[in-house]
Image (cartoon, grey):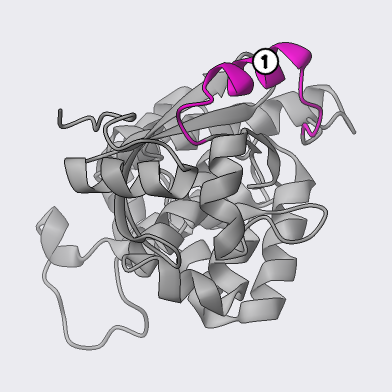
Amino acid sequence: MDGELGAFLRSRREALRPGQVGLPEGVRRRTPGLRRAELATLAQVSVEYLTRLEQGRDTRPSPEILAALADALRLDDADRQHLQELASVNHRQQLCAGERSAVSRTVRPEVRALLEALRDRPAYLLNRLGDVLAWNETFDRLARPLGLLDGAHPNLVWFVFTDERAREYFPDWAELADQQVTELHGLRRGDPATDAFAERLGRTVGAPFMSRWQRRPVAVRSTGVRWLRHPEVGPLRLAYETLDVADDQQRLVVQLPADAASAEALDRLLGRRPGGLRSVAG
């Protein structure tokens, strides 16, 4: 997490056009977005102090300065919350030197029981790196033909970016890739494992991952609909709901057919009589 506060501020400064804050666009800008001096003026801080923040030489700005920067950068609610979390993490790390929040890979028996209780719905458990820690039989029938569960330690983010089948099976691959990077950023908790994972993935796939990672998106969506082109039963539209699992920093994802055709296709895949699984659309 070292330097992440400054990198996040810089990413939002470079993404903000001068015209969005009432400044002339100008014709000779070396980089897109606001200049440091322009943001400093808008936030009423010195250029020198803003430089220290962005370079990671000052990691404990006051709440007032954070609020002024957030207002000047026109941050939305998700970005504001993330900025506050970054500042809070830096403060905790300085108070408790060397103390890090480990990535959880242990699945509690109660969570395994819950997965089994959801046997009529594809359901799986993720940690914040995207490791698929546990899943029920229904998800196994859905995901194994895709190759997602290949290997001893499947990882959803790694699959999306490194496996060519992901682009074939997910028609909205670009949106899915954006979401995976957003969740990596939005769920960071001061643990260097996330940065190490991102660095390794960036070295492996290059721009498709790094261009997204460097934008530092953080607005995590807990629900939505995903298209899937399944190799055995064809097109599926699956709604998903994401539930946080207590303090384990894990997420339980439950999928539901989003329409009648998808419900019938999922029934075929699972060997059930048609109509055994209702869609969320009724």
Indicate whether residue 118 is drawn in magenta: yes
For this view, does 223 lie left or right of residue 57? left
Report the residue marked by disc 1: 113
**Residue range (magenta):** 104-122
Q: Is residue 178 above or below residue 270?
A: below
Q: Nearer the viewer, residue 52 or 96?
A: 96
- Residue at 38%, 40% in the rendered image: 79
Evaluate whether residue 225 shows in this view: no
Q: Quadrant of the C terminus?
A: top left
Write down the quadrant of residue 158 in the picture. bottom right
Secondary structure beneath dot 1 equals helix
Residue 234 lies, in percent from the top left, at 34, 63
Residue 224 lies, in percent from the top left, at 29, 40
Q: Mark 1 belongs to which amino acid?
A: Ala
- Residue at 83%, 54% in the rendered image: 152
For this view, does 100 lie left or right of residue 29? right
Evaluate whether residue 42 shows in this view: yes
Residue 45 lies, in percent from the top left, at 40, 44
For this view, does 239 lie left or right of residue 62? left
Q: Nearer the viewer, residue 92 or 44?
A: 92
Indicate whether residue 83 is drawn in magenta: no
